[in-house]
Image (cartoon, rainbow, N blue to C red):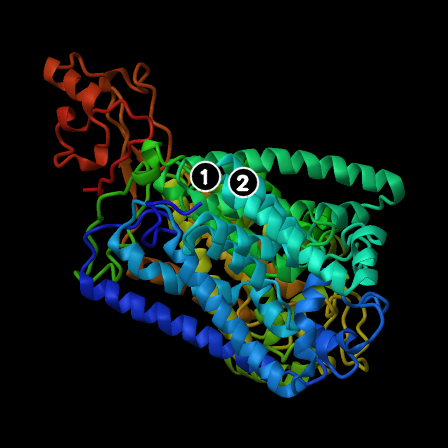
């Protein structure tokens, strides 16, 4: 499958910008290689720090003192070995080596295979590529491989799952000659039978000798294993239907195949087997047809990745350490707009590096998606994702992003990051949802880790900080929490209202504000989202450095928990919700901080005075709710206001002032807030705003102008008229 276009590295994550200074590219390249080296050292350290009985468990099962490869009987009697008879034949000689020395050699050998795999993948990327991409592709590929769950599991378990992937890539892109290529892929198929799917890919892309050589090598290796171990071969190929019945718990979440998914859905017996065979045949036919099309298009690495994704789906068992094929799918380019180009690679990297619980909320209705997230990503790669053809004009030159002209700042050194320009168009929705979900998962994990991973771990320190806060408020004469909490508890309507407000509006209002901004004012959405993100990150620092017990969890102060009821302070993890989240993450209060962010955004951007007033009522009711229910101190709200102010300040310093007004394109030439749709050109609000006549020269500009942001003089109609619906330009108020 190798051809003349695959003689140099390519771009795995989109087009590279040409003209980058050599010094900057060299520095980035060195940094990426250092990151790859640090990740490799870290993976080795993690393996070696793991207790001897807990590391390389699969390797121990095979070649350890009591491993199946030492047994004279069948490899499959203990139901521990799930590889092919050929794999057992190859691995059996290793059982004679010293166990400890072999474990070290296997760990470092696996790291070497990962490096080779990254280098081969980098050199197999489709042309044309930029020099920057050619320099950065290899260290970036190796770093992603080191971070991926399949490689991490392989190192931890001592598995051989990297070898078939590497053999296929070497056969497709490294060796010369079709017979040599077929021999390597055939050996990979002897270790992992679903690799035989590459034979039709080779055949239908004109590599018929390689396809025949693949089949012949697979048959020869299997025959040798059958001659050496006839009983085991019969058990694997006939009794267990090519290994389909081997291994414990095939319905476990780690089995990311169609067979495993159907078992998790509760299907069993002939119905499940028939449905699996039918679905597998359909996936194989459609996926291989797409792979052949992209191979003929010159995207051979993408074709290999899609074939591997088909193998994941149709294999009876695709354990987590065998899912490396999906990571190779990042080489496909998706999206005609430049802003969409990174959505697919980021989604794949997140799926391959993060646990599924971080990708989707822990809700029972989402269990089928969360339990099969890798399988769904593999099926999407093989069947659905519209990868661009190399002949498409957007493949090399995607539609550029619309940026606002820089807004003059108060200080010359603002913004600190001039390249972080204000984007006028709305970002990709999938990428935003992934960002929100992963960010919130990190937020939850940080809150829990702030007390050492357990709630009770930080109880004493948090209560000590609670006494400090209470003393400071008494000194400042602002300790009104106890009075207001008792008043709320004695007044039924106040208790019901504030309990509902506290539990219901914390997430609903910020998400609603973000949704409205995303749909109606995309330029302002990015500004507001950045400020909220910075505020949340700063709050996490506060949770980590200053765990604080809320008033309701201070035993001696007699606060009433109006939401959770009476607490049993004799229990280490007291409180109804202490098992779900860190109850000592009170300073700063993000309940108040997020509500203040909502109020400020609404007050700044809302067009009507009553909308602004309604928005400012939200933080007022929130501070009443957090104090009345006994969940926060007054100083917690002050801390929340501080991180929100710092979030807006960081956004200003890093990106510069927000885009306050955008000149709307239309007959009336009316300025409007950034992101709002343009006024209809034929219906201005005020007849006086309608121009009496449009000069002929301006009409020409109206038909040709593509981006108003390029206009140098916004005072002249002929320089700003445009028919582009999305064209927007920044204008600072006089």
Taking depth in this image into account, of 312 and 120 the one nearest to the observer is: 120
Where 104 falls versus 197 (above or below)?
A: below
Report the residue at 64% width, 73% height from top.
158
Q: Could you tell me residue 265's position as x and y percent?
A: 80, 45
Q: Secondary structure at mark 1?
A: helix
Report the residue at 51% width, 73% height from top.
111
Q: Could you tell me residue 342's position as x and y percent?
A: 42, 48
Crowd tier of the residue under label 1, counting other residues whose Cα lies within 10 Å: few below 14, some 14–19, many 20 or above: many
Q: Secondary structure at mark 2?
A: helix
**CA distance separating discs 2 and 1:** 9 Å
Q: Given contact means CB atoms under 8 Å apart, are the residues at marks 2 and 1 in contact?
A: yes
Q: Could you tell me residue 2's position as x and y percent?
A: 41, 47
Q: For the residues carrying marks 2 and 1, which lies nearer the camera in this image?
A: 2
> Disc 1 marks which residue?
295
Taking depth in this image into account, of 145 and 510 the one nearest to the observer is: 145
Task: State the mark number for residue 201.
Answer: 2
Taking depth in this image into account, of 54 and 312 the one nearest to the observer is: 312
Sequence-first disc among 2 and 1: 2
In the image, taking residue 81 as reference, residue 723 lies left or right, namely left
Residue 431 shows up from this direction: yes
* Res. 132 image quadrant: bottom left
Taking depth in this image into account, of 40 and 373 the one nearest to the observer is: 40
Q: Quadrant of the C terminus?
A: top left
Where 565 falls versus 101 (above or below)?
A: above
Report the residue at 49% width, 67% height from top.
114
Q: Quadrant of the N terminus?
A: top left
């Amino acid at each position: 499958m190798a051809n003349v276009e695959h003689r140099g590295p390519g771009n795995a994550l989109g087009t590279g910008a040409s003209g980058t200074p050599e010094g900057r590219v060299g520095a980035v390249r060195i940094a990426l290689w250092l990151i790859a080296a640090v990740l490799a050292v870290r993976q080795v350290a993690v393996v070696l720090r793991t207790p001897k009985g807990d590391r390389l468990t699969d390797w121990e099962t095979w070649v350890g003192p009591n491993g199946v490869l030492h047994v004279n009987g069948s490899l499959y009697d203990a139901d521990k070995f799930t590889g092919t008879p050929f794999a057992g034949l190859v691995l059996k000689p290793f059982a004679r080596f010293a166990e400890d020395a072999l474990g070290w050699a296997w760990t470092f050998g696996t790291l070497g295979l990962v490096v080779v795999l990254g280098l081969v993948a980098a050199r197999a990327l489709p042309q044309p590529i930029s020099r920057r991409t050619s320099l950065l592709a290899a260290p970036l590929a190796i770093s992603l491989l080191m971070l991926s769950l399949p490689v991490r599991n392989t190192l931890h378990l001592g598995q051989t799952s990297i070898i078939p992937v590497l053999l296929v890539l070497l056969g497709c892109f490294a060796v010369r000659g079709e017979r040599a290529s077929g021999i390597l892929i055939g050996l990979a198929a002897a270790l992992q039978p679903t690799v035989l799917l590459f034979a039709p890919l080779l055949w239908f892309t004109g590599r018929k000798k390689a396809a025949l050589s693949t089949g012949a090598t697979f048959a020869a290796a299997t025959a040798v294993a059958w001659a050496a171990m006839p009983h085991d071969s019969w058990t694997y190929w006939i009794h267990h239907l090519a290994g389909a019945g081997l291994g414990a718990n095939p319905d476990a979440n780690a089995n990311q195949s169609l067979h495993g998914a159907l078992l998790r859905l509760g299907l069993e017996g002939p119905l499940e087997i028939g449905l699996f065979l039918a679905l597998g045949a359909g996936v194989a036919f459609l996926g291989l047809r797409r792979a052949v099309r992209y191979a003929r298009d010159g995207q051979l690495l993408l074709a290999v990745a899609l074939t591997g994704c088909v193998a994941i789906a149709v294999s009876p068992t695709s354990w987590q350490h065998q899912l490396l094929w999906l990571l190779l799918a990042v080489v496909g380019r998706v999206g005609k707009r430049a802003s969409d180009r990174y959505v697919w690679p980021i989604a794949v990297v997140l799926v391959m590096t993060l646990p599924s619980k971080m990708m989707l909320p822990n809700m029972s209705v989402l269990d089928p998606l969360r339990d099969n997230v890798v399988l769904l990503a593999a099926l999407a790669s093989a069947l659905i994702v519209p990868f661009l053809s190399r002949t498409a004009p957007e493949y090399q030159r995607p539609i550029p992003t619309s940026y606002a002209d820089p807004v003059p700042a108060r200080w010359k050194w603002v913004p600190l990051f001039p390249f972080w320009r204000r984007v006028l168009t709305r970002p990709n929705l999938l990428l935003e949802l992934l960002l929100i979900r992963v960010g919130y998962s990190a937020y939850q994990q940080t809150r829990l880790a702030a007390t050492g991973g357990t709630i009770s771990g930080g109880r004493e320190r948090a209560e000590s900080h609670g006494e400090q806060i209470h003393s400071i408020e008494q000194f400042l004469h602002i300790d009104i929490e106890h009075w207001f909490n008792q008043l709320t508890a004695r007044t039924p309507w106040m208790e019901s209202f504030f309990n509902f407000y506290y539990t219901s509006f914390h997430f609903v209002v910020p998400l609603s504000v973000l949704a409205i901004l995303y749909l109606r004012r995309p330029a302002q959405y990015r500004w507001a989202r950045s400020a909220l993100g910075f505020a949340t990150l700063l709050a996490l620092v506060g949770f980590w450095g200053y765990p604080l017990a809320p008033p309701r969890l201070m035993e001696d102060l007699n606060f009433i928990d109006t939401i959770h009821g009476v607490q049993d302070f004799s229990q280490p993890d007291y409180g109804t919700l202490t098992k779900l989240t860190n109850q000592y993450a009170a300073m700063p209060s993000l309940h108040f901080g997020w509500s203040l962010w909502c109020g400020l955004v609404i007050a700044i951007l809302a067009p009507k005075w009553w909308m602004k007033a309604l928005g400012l009522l939200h933080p007022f009711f929130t501070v009443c709710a957090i104090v009345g229910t006994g969940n926060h101190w007054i100083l917690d709200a002050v801390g929340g206001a501080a991180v929100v102010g710092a979030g807006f300040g960081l956004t200003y310093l890093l990106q510069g002032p927000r885009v306050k007004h955008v000149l709307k394109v239309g007959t009336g030439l009316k300025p409007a807030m950034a992101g709002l749709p343009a006024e209809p050109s034929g219906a201005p609000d005020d007849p006086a705003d309608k121009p009496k006549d449009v000069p002929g020269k301006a009409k020409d500009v109206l038909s040709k102008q593509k981006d108003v942001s390029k206009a140098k003089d916004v005072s002249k109609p002929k320089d700003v008229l445009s028919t582009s619906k999305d064209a927007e330009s920044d204008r600072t108020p006089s």
